[in-house]
Image (cartoon, rainbow, N blue to C red):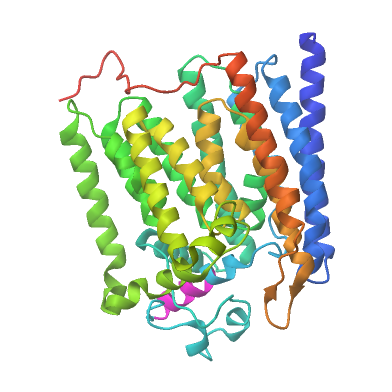
Amino acid sequence: MAPRHSTRFLLLTTLLCVGFSLLCALLLHGAPDRTAGASVVPVGWAWGAAAFGAAWTSRRTPVGLPVLLLAAAAVRIPLVGSPPLLSDDLFRYLWEGTVLAAGGNPFLESPASLPGLDDALRAHVNHPGLTSIYPPLALGWFRLLHLLGGSPWLAQACTASLDLVTVLALALMLRGTGASVWPAWLYALHPVPALESAAGAHLDVVAVALTAAAVLAWQRGRPGPAVLGVVAGAGVKLFPVLLLPVMFTRQAWRREVAGLLIAGVAMVVLLWPVLDAGPALVASMHTYWSSWSFNGLVYPLLAPVLGPYTRPVLAGAGVTAVGWGWWRYREPVGTWAVAGAAFVLLSPTVHPWYLLWVLVPSLMRRRWGWAAASVALLGSYGVLLGYDPGTDQWQVPAWLPWITWGPALAFLAVEALLRRHVKQPTAPSGPPAAPANVRHR
């Protein structure tokens, strides 16, 4: 394709992605209830195809970072302010920020136990009988959202803005290795991160942004900020703590320990106001661990056979996979990719926003399989067709795994087969290279 035609096609596919984002926003604004929110699924699938077209074309069309960030913002802006019908988790975030601002403890006081404290918001919080499950920096994020006004659109705008950090980190990492930035384009225009940041305002977006920035710092030979970023990410969602063991190097252990200590003190300060909850700090997390399940791949296959042992067995398999990733790669990108894949494949619960944990590291390694699988797994929002507003529950239809995991596994298999025949580089990997004018002390 000629450069001029490549530029035009990139512009066309990017505009298509913006158009699909706008259509999703219009569908959400016009939906009478959560059941109608499932209408975004076919739009999301078409959107994913357009994003792949743009990413493929970007390989032949050199474009600056400002244009990339502008394109990423353009597909997120239409979704800001849309009703959170796909997931109502952001109401829980705003509620816990309200409780903290009022001097309460969300680990001791569930929404159901606090009538009279912003009842309009409380009515939208899911599972009102459960207390908080979130780490300390997440609580700080909730408090910040409350201080800024505590509105859903604000939470969406702030989360979408942080998602641009992930776009930028991906682009800078790839440029630092001399590689094409097409994976950054794919993430920038991909429907899953756009929907989960600008519409869902999910915490995972915040944690992934911090983790991506930390890995970029590690790649650039800045171990202290890298460790600090990973701990900050773990302070929002616990997952990034799995990367810590491979971030310590003999040459820079003092800086890494300093970053770890600074982050640890910050976490304690943030958690201090709620420490009086004691064992209640993990009560709702135990409930989630022991009883939640939705759209898992392996769990529904093993549960009829292993019964109550299924979750411990899957957890053990996940720990083994992460240990193998530490041994195999000894660097954060490969380790993150293995841990993210194990999490998504083995977890009893797989919501679309969970896919960010494998999508980002796979794109850092210039792999497209999980990006395609994520588009397919967006179909799990089809469960909303069976949503019952009276009970706030849904019935999972028998066809759901076939339209989600079926094509997702097919995409992953095709990519694996192609990689066997055409060996592709998977940079960035290996130990961080410090700039020539910087010496580790």
Q: Residue furthest front?
A: 305
Residue name at image x 43 percent, y 38 percent: 336
Residue 95 on the magenta span:
yes
Q: Is residue 405 above or below residue 95?
A: above
Q: Position of residue 12 (x, y in %)?
A: 82, 28
Q: Is residue 282 above or below residue 211?
A: below
Q: How many marks?
A: 0
Q: Is residue 177 above or below residue 352?
A: above
Q: Nearer the viewer, residue 330 or 14?
A: 330
Location of residue 107 by image quarter: bottom left
Location of residue 390 by image quarter: bottom right
Q: Position of residue 316 (x, y in %)?
A: 38, 52
**Mainly helix, strand or loop, the magenta region?**
helix
* Whether residue 189 is visible: no
Q: Position of residue 432 (x, y in %)?
A: 32, 23
Quarter of the rendering occupied by the C terminus: top left
Q: Nearer the viewer, residue 82 or 374?
A: 374
Q: Residue furthest top?
A: 2
Q: Is residue 167 above or below residue 344?
A: above
Magenta stretch: give its range: 94-102
Residue 272 left/right relative to 286: left
Residue 384 left/right relative to 170: right
Quarter of the rendering occupied by the N terminus: top right
Q: Nearer the viewer, residue 324 or 94?
A: 324
Residue 146 on the magenta span:
no
Q: Position of residue 97 (x, y in %)?
A: 47, 71
Residue 88 left/right relative to 75: left
Residue name at image x 59 percent, y 59 percent: 300
Residue name at image x 42 percent, y 81 percent: 102
Location of residue 312 by image quarter: bottom left
